[in-house]
């Protein structure tokens, strides 16, 4: 597989909800969920990242963001194998890393003047979360 060239095309805050003020940031845990979306017509991959901040098992803050990345046409074509577009685990982790960093900035801006102003999105082990390549079967006319 060849390196994938791309450009960011969209950033969206899907959800931001402060449900209760944190009382002890040391007790805070973050549940992270990642999912992917694709638009084969525009060669776009979207990473959806959802972060649930919990304190004593109670949800205190919810943040969900989406970042979209458009793959350059030549990169797309160079990574088609047997009628499937192939995304390596490394490029998926890179897209996810950019999305998590964007979410960290969104959290800072949205929570800066609130009770969550000291809430920080911690580092996330994307190596552990994303280990496999992704293959998407293309319609006949895309092959």
Image (tube, grey):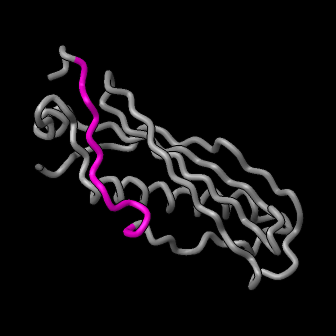
Residue 138: in magenta span:
yes
Residue at horizontal 58%, vertical 74%?
122
Residue 13 x/y as whole percent: 63, 44
Image side of residue 137 versus residue 52, left or right: left
Quadrant containing the C terminus in the rendered view: top left
Question: Looking at this view, is 98 or 137 the one in front?
Answer: 137
Expressed as whole percent of the image width and height from the top left, the position of residue 2 reads 11, 49
- Which sits in the foreground, 97 or 56? 56
Looking at the image, the residue that sits furthest to the bottom is 26
Q: Where is residue 69 in the image (x, y as percent from the top left)?
A: 37, 41
Residue at the (83%, 82%) spot, across then down: 24
Q: In this view, does 58 lie to the left or right of 133?
A: right
| Residue 6 appears left or right of 35 | left
| Magenta residues, start to end | 127-139
Q: Quadrant of residue 107?
A: bottom right
Residue at image location 59% in from the left, 61% down from the top? 32
Percent coordinates x, y for residue 71 in the rendering: 27, 38
Above or below: residue 79 compared with residue 83: below
């Amino acid at each position: 597989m060849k390196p994938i060239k791309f450009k960011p095309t969209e950033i969206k805050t899907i959800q931001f909800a402060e449900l209760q003020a944190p009382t002890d940031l040391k007790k805070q845990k973050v549940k992270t969920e990642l999912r992917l979306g694709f638009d084969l017509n525009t060669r776009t991959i979207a990473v959806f990242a959802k972060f649930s901040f919990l304190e004593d098992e109670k949800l205190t803050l919810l943040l969900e963001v989406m970042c979209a990345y458009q793959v350059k046409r030549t990169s797309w074509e160079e990574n088609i194998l047997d009628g499937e577009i192939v995304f390596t685990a490394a490029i998926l982790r890179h897209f996810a890393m950019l999305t998590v960093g964007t979410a960290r900035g969104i959290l800072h801006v949205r929570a800066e003047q609130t009770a969550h102003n000291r809430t920080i999105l911690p580092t996330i082990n994307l190596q552990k979360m994303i280990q496999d390549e992704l293959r998407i079967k293309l319609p006949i006319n895309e092959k």
